[in-house]
Amino acid sequence: KQSFKRPPGPHGLPFIGNLHQIDQSSLHTSLWNLSKTYGPIVSLRFGFNSAVVISSASLAKEILKTQDLVFCGRPLFTSPRKTSYNGIDLAFSPYNQNWKDMRKIFNLHLFNPKRVQSSRFIREDELSSVIKTLRDRALSSQKVNLSELMKNLMNSIMLRVCFGERYQDVYEKSKVFGLIDKVQAHMVDLHVSDIWPGLPFGGLVDRLMGKMNRLNKCFQDLDPFLQQLIDEQLIINKQKHKSCKEYENVIDVLLQLAEDNLFTLTHDHIKALLLDILVAGTDTTAATVVWAMSLLINNPKSMNKAQEELRNVIGIDGKLDEDHHLPRLTYLKAVIKETMRLYPPAPLLVPRETRKDAIVKGYEIKQKTLVYVNAWAIGRDPKSWDKAEVFLPERFLSESDIDFKGYRNDFDLIPFGAGRRICPGMSTGEMMVEVLLANLLYLFDWGEEDIDFNTMPGLTMHKKNHLCLLPQLYFEKIVGTSKGT
Ligand code: HEM
């Protein structure tokens, strides 16, 4: 039998492997630096776990397309195991029938184009109250914390999409937001028993460190909260007339699917899917808007071009219309692509796990190896990009066939991943970023500011220091807000 070598990588120490050589506070840049020494495929050990890091477009294609079937597993560590109800959700499910069902439910029933369109009134309503806040701040010459504002806006939109009109009260809403934040923090918190699986007393150490307690406490807050929402919806559905044509929220759709018995869909499945949407669909979008605004403030010429385009397309004293205006905002779309090239909100995508042994570039990768595809490194690779470190949306005006999908030959831009596990919220996320940015740029001018680009570790890569800016009214009257909203 032919023998293959492991991919190159730094020598590790017994027991801890390469943990001491990795900066956990900026994992993507730390792994990027290693790829500069060892090449586009690097082998590492995190405790007892083998890992590989992929840092070139051609190898990303090999992993996410050619050998996708081997690389489309997900590791299931202690915390996500708990919050995904034992991997029966979509994001953390192993590649199996459950994953296929959840994916179908997500694409066909929850986020199909018709449903995304029908939730437009929610986006417009929530946006109008943000615009009002911005307008008030502009009139009183006060800065606004855009990082917080965008995060709360996305949370509010997704909460209404998932649960309907139940969370209008500011205090109740902030309690739910706090809960989502906690779940997100847990999802990236590794336990001793994850790093050294099989180690005697690993679980005990986690208990002594209080990790299990904190995780269980979070789950005990979360589970009854989600269950109560399901129970309430069941009561509402009983009272509702079948032919009632009002907007159906996510719980509603999922309960109907469960009743139809087409899929195995227990209440735990429903709770796990709801969490996926709230966790995966809010922060990523908000973070992209904040990075885009930061880059535009730093590049006033691009800011002017984007605003000019918007004000030409929408006209004076108008209002953004998703259907009519978005397809015509070519420069804005280029700005968003360029933002995601330089600041992908999930710089290492979501880690994969090999389902079988594989050979990549002549190297052997064993089954159950953790796989990190470094979208950050690929987005800044001089082999893929001219002037890779420069913010230049114009590059996408001439190369408009490079899209986010990573389907074609271009795996140079993969902020949504690729292959079977590609983000199922891609078009929703893309559209939301466009709508939010378009409103910020069309209605307001933004003062100059010194912007830092430090990143914060976490499930989503946020700007470490909040983006605080001074909005200035561009139009004297803001349609929609000045008319009494
Ligand atoms: C700018 C916005 C977004 C970005 C950058 C983003 C990015 C990603 C990435 C990189 C992955 C992993 C893909 C892979 O493994 O190849 C992913 C998965 C996922 N995303 Fe998104 N996402 C965004 C918005 C959304 C939205 C709006 C939703 C929900 C409505 C969503 C739901 C999910 C789910 C459920 C998965 C797991 C899919 C699976 O494992 O099969 N995302 N996303």
Image (cartoon, rainbow, N blue to C red):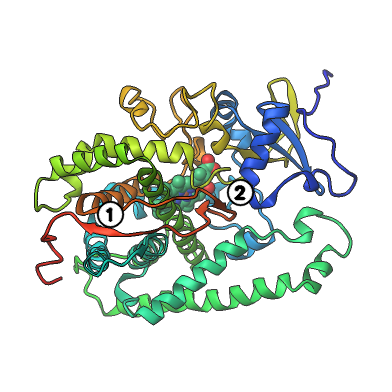
- Taking the spot 35% from the left edge, 79% from the top edge, the residue there is 170
| Residue type highlighted by circle 2 | Pro
Identify the element where label 2 is drawn: loop
Q: Position of residue 360 (x, y in %)?
A: 68, 25
Circle 1 residue: 115
- Label 1 Cα crowd, 10 Å radius (few <14 / some 14-19 / many 20+): some
Identify the element where label 1 is drawn: helix
Residue reaching furthest to the top:
2
Where 182 sits versus 124, above or below?
below
Circle 2 residue: 94
- Taking the spot 26% from the left edge, 64% from the top edge, the residue there is 134
| Of residues 250 and 425, the one drawn nearer to the viewer in this rendering | 425
Q: Quadrant of the N terminus?
A: top right
Q: Earlier in the sequence, mark 1 or mark 2?
A: 2
| Residue type highlighted by circle 1 | Arg
Q: Which mark is residue 318?
A: none
Q: CA distance from mark 1 to mark 2?
A: 27 Å
Q: Position of residue 478 (x, y in %)?
A: 14, 60
Which image quadrant is residue 127 in?
A: bottom left
